[in-house]
Structure formats: C-alpha cells, structure tokens
Image (spheres, grey):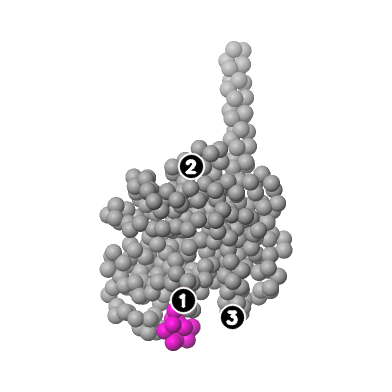
Amino acid sequence: MTLLLLAACRGEQVSVSTDDNAQADSLALHVAVMPVADCLPICYAQEKRLFAKQGLDVRLQLFASQMDADTALLYGHVELAYTDLARLLEMQGDSLPLRAVAAMDGRLSLLTTRKKRIRRLQDLNERMIALDRLSTSDYWSDEIMKQAGMERTAIYRPQINDVQLRRKMLHDQLVDGALLPEPYATQAERQGHRRIFSTPDSAVIFNCLATRANVLNVSRQRDQLQDFFRIYNQAVAELNHKPDEALLRTIWLRDYQLPASLADSMPPLSYPKARSPKDADADAALQWLLARERTLNRRQRDSLLSKLPLDH
C-alpha cells in the first residue's frame, strides 16, 4: 500500500509539472529566426539572457530556410517570424491575415564561383544563380539583370531555400553563383569566390519580422512584442558598441555553423534599431509580384503593415 501511495504521489507530481510546462510554453513568445545576420541581435539577446532577465519568456526556433519559418508562422507554431514583404503578400489571406511588424536590413551579395570567369554582371548570361523564389533574393536577381542590361530570363534560377546549402552548392560548383546574406557572403568570399554585387544602402527593404493579426489583437501578446523590441534595441546597442566576443563566437559556431577561423575573424556588423516597415517598400513588393503575374490586389498590401509602435 505504501508503494502504491508513493507511486500515486510521483504520478501526481509529474502531471502537475507537465501542466505547468505546457502553460508556461503557451504564455511564451515563440520566434522563428534564421542563421542570417539580420537575426543576430535576437540570438544575441537570447544567449545573453536579456529577455529572461527582464521577465520575458522567449523561445527561439531556428530554421535554415525562410519557407520553413513562414510555415511555422502560418500554422501558429510561432508568434513572430523572420520573412519578407513579398512572401507575406503571397501568403496574405482573409482567413489568416499577416502583419509586417519591423523592417530588417536584408542585405544580400551575389557571389560567383572562383573557377569560372564570371567577373561582371554581363558575364551572367545563361548561368545558374541559386536563390529562393518570390522573395528578396529573387527580387534582386531581377534588379541585377536590369543593371546588366539583360533580359530577366537570361539566367537560370534554381530554388535553394536553405541559405547554408546555397553557399555550399556555390563552393562545390553545383551552381555558377548564389545570392547570399551575411555571414555566408563573407564566408564564400574568404573561400575565394567573387563578390560581384551587393545591395546598395538606399535600396528597398523587403525583409522583416512578421506576426499574425490575431496575435496583435491579444493585449498580452501585443505587450510581449513591445517588450521584445525594447530588449532587441538593447541588444543592437550592445552589438554596435561593445559586444561580448566570446558569446558572439558561440553563436557563430553553434547556430550559424561557421568555421572557427571565420568565427574568430568575422568583421563587425552594425544594426539599426527596430523600425516600422515603409509603405514604399510594401508598394515595391506588390508591384514586383504583379510584374511576375502573381494574383494579388491592393487590399492585401494595404492591410500588410502593422501599426505596432516601435522605439526609434
């Protein structure tokens, strides 16, 4: 009887613990990030426990491709996800409206393989350029063709959604070029591949952090987002001035899977504070998708941008 009572007590304790964990998980803010430079302030804040120290329970989910992060947002596995305005417009719908909350940097570079003579944009004719379709990198592939004075169809566009795999395919010469974010553009350049194009500072910005409209309608979750971006700005300030180098190295090695030599010598990156996406960028995303003959309407664009106030 004593053994039965002990077993019953243990079972009750386990059950309560499980319920508590489930409740804590349901109250947490789940964020889908990618191993790209844009997401480094988020990873840094999490690794340094800046969120936890200020009472915000943030759970990060790391995805190697933007499509997977988008799926996590659509199916409610996360409340906030790294994506871009073009992808949001593609996914936008009346039953599950999406909102762009904060603009991200979204810089990209075009790297071409070192073993082929592709030194100028004009050398890209009939070459394979790896990217992820109907997203920021695809948009820039069109802009690059315009700058080269070539037709959009002059290059082939294999869809490689995993950014780490895209860099590896470039290095293994399975593609002629790849549009890469940091830190993989720098990694490819250190491996001897040529950087022949980088997005200009004055460029449109498609990349963003996005949420679902129903998240913004819940006051608790809306407050969580406000706290998230306040702490995000603290991480940005620290990264721009005096980051914890040992902590940064841990993130580069573990989450971004950089080689130790690059993790130890990665050039410093600067970050702006969280800011709202611009109407002009959303318009540019809509016009580009319409030029690609996507079925969209102005109403989808007008409801895209969130009115969540951010610190400036």
The amino acid at mark 1 is Ser
Foreground residue, 84 or 200? 200
Crowdedness near tag 2: few (<14), some (14–19) or many (≥20) residues, C-alpha within 10 Å: some
Quadrant housing residue 110: bottom left
150 within the magenta span: yes
Direction from residue 294 to residue 173 in the image, left or right: left
Q: Identify the secondary structure beneath mark 2.
A: helix
Tag 1 and tag 2, C-beta contact below 8 Å: no
Q: Secondary structure at mark 3?
A: helix
**Image coordinates for residue 211, horizontal then vertical, percent:** 61, 56
**Label at residue 50:** 2
Gap in angstroms between the C-alphas marked 3 and 2: 43 Å
Amino acid under label 3?
Ala
User: Mark 1 and mark 3 in contact (Cβ < 8 Å)?
Assistant: no
Q: Nearer the viewer, mark 1 or mark 2?
A: 2
Which residue is rendered at x = 56% and y = 41% of the image? 56
Query: Which amino acid is tagged 2?
Result: Leu
- The residue at 65%/64% (across/down) is 304
The residue range painted magenta reads: 144-159
Determine which of the numbered discs, if any, sits on residue 141 in the image: 1
Query: x, y percentage for residue 207?
Result: 52, 64
